[in-house]
Image (cartoon, rainbow, N blue to C red):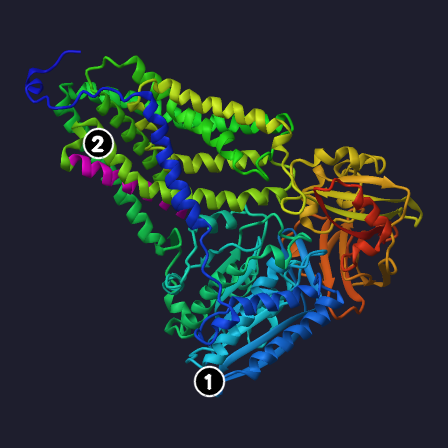
Amino acid sequence: MTFNSKYHLDVDFEVPKKLQWYYAPAFFAFWLVLYFSVVNTQINHMPTPLLRSDEASNPTSFIAQRAEETLIELTRIGPRVVGSITNEETTVEFLRSEVAKVEAEMSDRYEIEVDVQQASGAYMHWEMVNMYQGIQNVVVKLSERNSTNENYLLINSHYDSVPGSPGAGDDGSMVVTMLEVMRVIAKTGDPLAHPIVFLFNGAEENPLQASHAFITQHKWAHNCKALINLDSAGSGGREILFQSGPNHPWLMNYYRNVPHPFANTLAEELFQAGYIPSDTDFRIFRDFGGVPGLDMAYIFNGYVYHTKYDRINAFPRASFQHTGDNVLSLARALANAPEMDDTEAHAEGHNIFYDFLGWFMIFYTQTTSIIINVVVAVLALLGIGISIYFMCLRSGCSWKGVLLRFAITFGIQLVSVFLAIGLALLVAVFMDGVNRSMTWFTSSWTIWGLYLSPIIFGLGILPALYLERTKRDPLGLGFRIQLFLHSHCLCLILIMLILTGMSIRSAFLIMVCLVFDIIALIVNLVTKWHRKAYLFAIAVMVCQILPFIFFTYLCTTALITMVPMQGRSGSSTNPDLVVAGMVWLFSLMFAGFIVPLTMFFRKTRTIVLCFLGITILFIIIAVTDAGFPYKEKTSPQRYSMIHAHRRLHNADGSTRIDESGLYIYPQDRRFDIAHDQIEAFGETHKVSDFCHEEMFCGMPLYNHRWNKAREYSLWVETSEQPEVPTEYPKLVLQDSIELESAGQRRFNFTLEGPSHMGIFINVKNDAKILNWSFNDTLIRENEEPPFMVYFSYGLDDSPLEFTIDVEKTTSTFDTPTLEIGIGGHWVTQDITAIDKLSSYISRFPSYAYIQGWVGSYETWYF
């Protein structure tokens, strides 16, 4: 390399000697200590719960002990499944009693009105018609006496639970939080400009039926102008705000003032994109009522969600205080917000919002975000350009030489980014290929060895090899490491601009990362530390402390949320791919500017290879018994199972199939673990084996999710019939009448059966459904049969009457026209009282949790 004499006179840069390799452990220990002392501590930080003895000195505060005691009483009722006495009678009376207690100590300033709504209706829930009859809501309106304000704040949670679960976390914890918030507000007598409607909804798990009933039919529904929705996908911890608005950024002006903020746009986008296997009432209020609001839920300890382990002893008292403080603050603020008088006037677009370690909130509109992202990208590019200019000026290398090196470095860094994700995905595919996926399910610490280590190796090995082979390059080591930092910055700029162009609001994460790199760059240029390798490195390290804390905080929170969810996300996809991708994404932000600093140590290649060794070590650990994913009570493996009797009839009324069996729906990837026990029950088939012959596989599918999981679900033939507690569903064709047009006929049916039934409808012999008495969306949009109708009832068990209008143009009604299947589900029963079902459940491994019931399935031609 020749030196231009003009630049040679200005050469003023440090040619550093590499640090000894044994300083590297201290370097990595610094970041580990930072993580455990700040991030891990803050994630688990909770407010001190207030006791009854604290009430006198805190008369306007939420009292956690009160909420806890109320939850104890609520969960003593037992599982609260729609259609059961516990849900439709006992819990309703319990809620009325608790509201009466509030009313008894209420300030004279207020008045309370209670309404127990009973409603029937239907709507589309994804691919199925969701139909309900006689479900209930307990609705309470708290307002100032003689208030004429017609704009209400709605606060919602649900008191029903899934079969077999006491529902302490989901959603009893939020029900009792609402009761305590109501008590505190009613007792203190502070101004309440807008009435508050407390909706205790009795059918969310069905799914989302009671919220639909309220927002489409209740007398106060059209007055509700804003919403606080409270739900749970875990048990305890901190509740996260994961949906806001939409298009109402003013709501965040009030949330930002809550005592314990915990919110992130990334959570909202992941949820709305379908990556979270749950849904909430928020969607119903938004889609059917146009009510903007805030959606909050517990996400920690998702292992017990929807299981019998969702008990009060798994729910920490401090979580009541955390949520109660926030909801009480929000309720008071929103109920007195002037925006409530005309919410539409304040609809201004989507929000970007995020908290920093629960200390404070940052939020701004999506339009502002686009501007910020573009400005940051321009500033980063400008900073890189200035840095390279001074690099040319001070290094003695020509600008062409520096740019060539920068191009090579950028190429290496880009390949390293793809190598990092490639290695992580390779580990994920390997673990799944040897039937060892989800080894991190209970021992989540293994994620750092299985996935973070290969990512660090992938990010570091090519730069290490390149710098080793070019150690005699006239461009100093410090400048060459700076080029790798600039290259990573350029990679992030490209990612951010792509995400921004796709209207993905979570691009703000990359923006935050770039801001701190820009700060480090400015500091180094202003102080001229960019000439002195180690001072430059120290500046980079210091400027990376806050983003390291922020992104490891987000990464840990995401893993705490997503890891338990992989136990109920189905068997069709490899969950290790999800974890690998998530760790890679966050690693680019919390480690991307740190890994190049390891190049200052001697034996860099050996240091980086250590991460590959760690990966291999953790793979060995994972494939042994130490990597077994499940643990009884705390992190069980989930199955849903129906002991069912199915009878399928031919067109002439004869029976072609009459058998009993176990319908087993494994909810995660590792159902192979219990395969031997399952096969011992009887002859085993994949449910999908029946799907090409029978409508909806000829099985009593509980809902549309079961249909999606049919490839990995099992039907096990048994010799014993299920112990069905009542009569099988009874479908009766009352009559069929010709309509005015030729070739058209109306079939009138009645259906009786248990509180949860599936109605499956198909057409035969070129028939076409013109209309029916169910929700008409499927017919109106010309969807192809067969169709599924999910039907449940609460108090009203009267027979369901429905009609189907059919047209035939190429055949007569003497040939079969309709095929109808009815699945009966006795989900309200105590399975411990059903001996045969309990016997099958007891033969599963101890670490398995079985959500089971008895059922039936029968088809007819008409």
Classed neighbour count for the residue bearing mark 1: other residues with Cα under 10 Å, few (<14), some (14–19), many (≥20): few
Residue 513 in view (yes/no): yes
Q: Amino acid at mark 2?
A: Phe
Look at 30% across and 13% down and name the residue there.
469
The residue carrying mark 1 is 148
Q: Closer to the observer: label 2 or label 1?
A: 2
Residue 783, image x, y percentages: 66, 50
Relative to 288, does residue 32 appear above or below in the rendering? above
- Secondary structure of the residue carrying numbered label 2: helix
Look at 38% across and 53% down and name the residue there.
355
Q: Quadrant of the N terminus?
A: top left
Relative to 188, does residue 181 appear above or below in the rendering? above
- Region rendered in magenta: 501-525
- Secondary structure of the residue carrying numbered label 1: loop
Relative to 30, does residue 423 appear above or below in the rendering? above
Location of residue 624 (image quadrant): top right
Q: Is residue 542 left or right of residue 87?
A: left
Using the image as rendered, state which of residue 70 and residue 146 is in the foreground. Answer: 70
In the picture as drawn, the residue positioned furthest to the front comes out as 53
Residue 530, image x, y percentages: 18, 30
N-terminal of the pair, mark 2 or mark 1, is 1
The residue carrying mark 2 is 536
Q: CA distance from mark 2 to mark 1?
A: 65 Å
Using the image as rendered, state which of residue 446 and residue 140 is in the foreground. Answer: 446
Residue 510 in view (yes/no): no
Q: Is residue 537 left or right of residue 5?
A: right
Judged by its main secondary structure, the magenta piece is helix
